[in-house]
Image: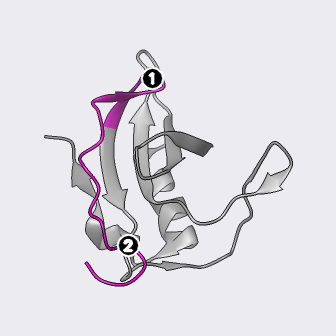
Amino acid sequence: MVGHFARAMNQPPKDINGARVVCYAEISDSVRPTAATTHRRDGHVLGPARGLVICQYSGESSFYLFYCDEDWSVRTDTFHLSLEDAKHQAEFEYEGISRYWKDLA
């Protein structure tokens, strides 16, 4: 990669915040943050995530879209009733991310 995201990220762990990773995508220069939503943490507006992870907690049918930093630490998240809904939200916020989803090997 070139540009802002010069360093490729490692693969995320199998579990993040106690939830099983279903799939993940690294934000690269070929993905455009749309600024269609604003995420806040501790009263501060967060910039674009470095990676996205869709996770599921044991015994639940719903999914979480985790917005992560370069070390796969969760900065914020959104709740979704289906995997498709989580991926749709990711594309709404990061145009072009759909082609980068990877299943965790």
Identify the residue shown where x is 71% and y is 67%.
37
Q: Position of residue 79 (x, y in %)?
A: 60, 41
In the depicted structure, whether residue 62 falls above or below residue 39: above
The quarter holding residue 28 reads bottom left
Q: SS of the residue at dot 1?
A: loop
User: Could you give the CA–CA distance between mark 2 and mark 1, rounded to whole angstroms?
Assistant: 30 Å
Q: Are marks 2 and 1 in contact (CB under 8 Å)?
A: no
In the depicted structure, whether residue 103 falls above or below residue 13: below
- Residue 16 in sight in this render: yes
* The N terminus - image quarter: bottom left
Identify the residue shown where x is 58% and y is 66%.
48
**Can you tell which of label 2 and label 1 is closer to the viewer?**
2
Q: Position of residue 75 (x, y in %)?
A: 60, 45
Magenta stretch: includes residue 16: yes
Who is closer to the viewer here, 50 or 32? 50
Q: Position of residue 24 (x, y in %)?
A: 33, 51
For label 2, the crowd category at 10 Å Cα-Cα, with few meaning under 14, some 14 to 19 and many 20 or more, is some
In the depicted structure, whether residue 31 falls above or below residue 43: below
What are the residue bounds of the magenta stretch?
A: 1-21
Q: Which mark is residue 5?
A: 2
Q: SS of the residue at dot 2?
A: loop
Which three-letter amino acid code belongs to the residue tagged 1? Tyr
Residue occupied by mark 1: 57
Magenta stretch: includes residue 19: yes
The quarter holding residue 104 reads top left
Q: Position of residue 31 (x, y in %)?
A: 41, 78
**Seen in the image, is 93 located left or right of residue 96?**
right
**Seen in the image, is 36 located left or right of residue 67?**
right
First along the sequence among labels 2 and 1: 2
